[in-house]
Amino acid sequence: MSYALNVGEALGIAWLTYLVTHNQDSPWLYLGAIILGCFVLAPVNFRYSRVFLLYWLSPKIHYQSYLDTDDIPGKS
């Protein structure tokens, strides 16, 4: 899931870079912008890739509170 988000972010950053600079000659401009943007957006990507995976791609998995026995006092 994080790979798909990274690809989408890279395409979006490349498109925004083109809109701002209108430069078609330098691949280094796009490469630098994409790498910098992916590093800046890494925490967002980390969080939302897990959210998408848990809630959208595994809809039949639900929290079962009766299995959580670590917090019951007196039970070892």
Image (cartoon, rainbow, N blue to C red):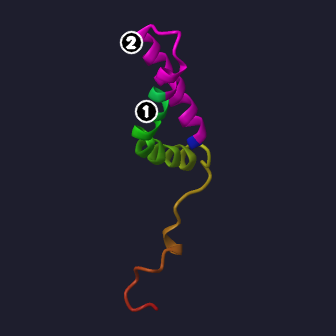
Residue in view at x 52 percent, y 44 percent? 49
Left or right of 4, for residue 47 = left
Amino acid carrying mark 1 in the image: Gly
Mark 2, Cα crowd under 10 Å, few <14 / some 14-19 / many 20+, is few
Question: What is the number of the mark on residue 37?
Answer: 1
Bounds of the magenta segment: 3-31
Q: Position of residue 56 (x, y in %)?
A: 57, 42
Residue in view at x 57 percent, y 47 percent? 53
Element marked by disc 2:
helix
Instruction: Identify which residue, 64 or 11, lies in the foreground.
Output: 11
Q: Is residue 42 above or below residue 75?
A: above
Q: Position of residue 6 (x, y in %)?
A: 54, 36
Res. 11 image quadrant = top right
Q: Is residue 27 magenta?
A: yes
**Residue placed under numbered mark 2 in the picture:** 20
Instruction: Identify which residue, 54 or 72, lies in the foreground.
Output: 54
Q: Position of residue 1 (x, y in %)?
A: 59, 42
Element marked by disc 1:
helix
Mark 1, Cα crowd under 10 Å, few <14 / some 14-19 / many 20+, is some
Amino acid carrying mark 2 in the image: Val
Instruction: Identify which residue, 40 or 26, lies in the foreground.
Output: 26
